[in-house]
Amino acid sequence: MLTNKIAKACLFGGVLSLSVLGSTTAMAANQQSYNIDVFAHVPSDDFQVEPVESGWINQAQEIEYDITTSKLKAFEKQFQYKNVSGGIQATLMNTDSNGDAILSNGTDIIPLKVEFNGVELSDTAKTVVDDTTAKAGGRTTLRISQSDSKALTVQGDFTGQVAMMFEEALVNP
């Protein structure tokens, strides 16, 4: 009789296991899963120079041609900045032999003027935000334009890259 009870218990346990396994298998057939890539950039509280509007910085930006003036229109974007230690300086990183950022079609070049907070940038570091203003933080304009006001006499598809480095302004002892 004990053997019969053990056999019934084993049989019941086996049936229960199969039914649980079967329902798990049935549920797995109706599952959907997703992987969502997310990211966040949290800048330092001490030093930051960041575009206000996200999503454009790593994409090519068109500097439009004005057919009525035969000149390039200025490209402008807003940046926010802060440096609790003092001023902020900026340097153009990829320039031609004259220290200019350029557009090129492989044959011809169009020199560009790059301004941050109204200060024209070059391959030499320049203070673009003074100590007091940088400590408080704020917003300003990055402006990329044709370096002169002459009508363009070149044609074609021009490309280039404006690379800037922002860093804490050096304090003179």
Image (cartoon, rainbow, N blue to C red):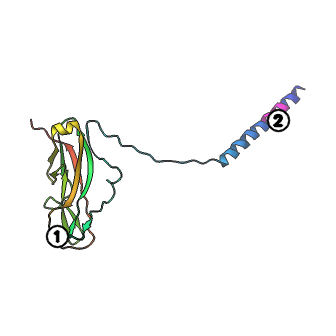
Magenta stretch contains residue 139? no
Q: Which mark is residue 11?
A: 2
Classified by dominant secondary structure, the portion drawn in magenta counts as helix
Where does the image place residue 123, in percent across and percent down from the top left? 15, 54
Identify the residue at the far right of this view: 1
* Residue under numbered circle 1: 151
In the image, taking residue 4 as reference, residue 39 lies left or right, namely left
User: Which element is circle 1 on?
Assistant: loop
In the image, taking residue 33 as reference, residue 173 lies left or right, namely left
Q: Which mark is residue 101?
A: none
Magenta stretch contains residue 11? yes
Amino acid at circle 1: Ala
Determine which quarter of the picture holds residue 83.
top left
Quarter of the image where the N terminus is located:
top right
Q: Nearer the viewer, mark 1 or mark 2?
A: 1
Which span of residues is magenta-colored?
A: 8-13
User: Which element is circle 2 on?
Assistant: helix
In the image, taking residue 114 as reference, residue 157 lies left or right, namely right
Disc 2 crowd, CA 10 A, few/some/many (<14, 14-19, 20+): few
Identify the residue at the far top of this view: 2
Where does the image place residue 105, in percent across and percent down from the top left? 25, 70
Disc 1 crowd, CA 10 A, few/some/many (<14, 14-19, 20+): some
Looking at this view, is 161 or 152 the one in front?
152
* Total numbered labels placed on residues in the image: 2
Looking at this view, is 136 or 158 the one in front?
136
Residue under the image location 21 percent in, 72 percent down:
107
Determine which quarter of the picture holds residue 112.
bottom left
Amino acid at circle 2: Leu
Residue under the image location 79 percent in, 38 percent down:
15
| Lower sequence index among marks 1 and 2 | 2
The answer to whether residue 124 is above or below residue 85 is below
